[in-house]
Image (spheres, rainbow, N blue to C red):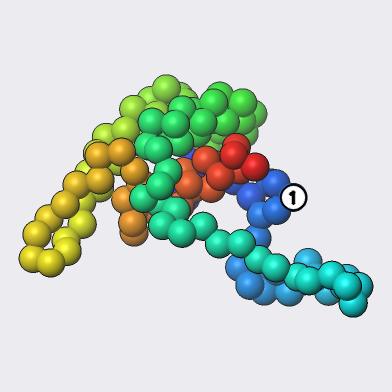
Amino acid sequence: GRILGPLVGHTHHHLRDSADLVNKLEGIVIPPDYELISCDLVSMFTNVNQAEAIRLAEQRLKDDATLKERTPLKPEDISKLLKHDIKLAYFWFGGKYYAQPRSLGMGKLTSSPLADIFIENFE
């Protein structure tokens, strides 16, 4: 939301949704000998390292001059909260509960911006 959301989406390759892609491609002519391809990350959340994503997020929070306008929390405190939130990443499959001790939880509000931060850093 309001704390992590403004930290992502500032790279050249970021797309909000398919409509954003259509807008960015408008007016671009692809030469006949070129092909337009797209790449998708498979199982992105389950392949993002929690500790690294949180470390990267904390660094971006420290570098964010507008953070104080969004929250009185310090980057270190937000990082601690993220660690606690991520530890609660459980899912139900085949009649059993499973923990995700090293990756980001599917469906968690914090997972999407943390994954974006991780991938933007990777780019």
Residue 72 on image: x %, y %: 46, 29
Q: Amino acid under label 1? A: His
Q: Quadrant of the C terminus?
A: top right
Q: As rendered, which of 50 and 35 lies closer to the eye?
A: 35
Q: Which residue is painted at 61% across and 68% down in the image?
A: 17
**In the rendered image, the vertical position of residue 47 relative to residue 38, given as above or below:** above
Q: Which residue is mark 1?
A: 12
Residue 79 occupies which quadrant of the picture?
A: top left
Evaluate whether residue 83 shows in this view. yes
Relative to 2, 120 lies left or right: right
Task: Find numbered disc 1 in the image and state the secondary structure of the residue it sits on.
Answer: loop
Q: Which residue is painted at 37% across and 37% down in the image?
A: 50
Relative to 102, 71 lies left or right: right
Residue 29 on image: x %, y %: 90, 73
Q: As rendered, which of 49 and 53 lies closer to the eye?
A: 49
Residue 43 occupies which quadrant of the picture?
A: bottom left
**In the rendered image, the vertical position of residue 18 relative to residue 110, given as above or below:** below
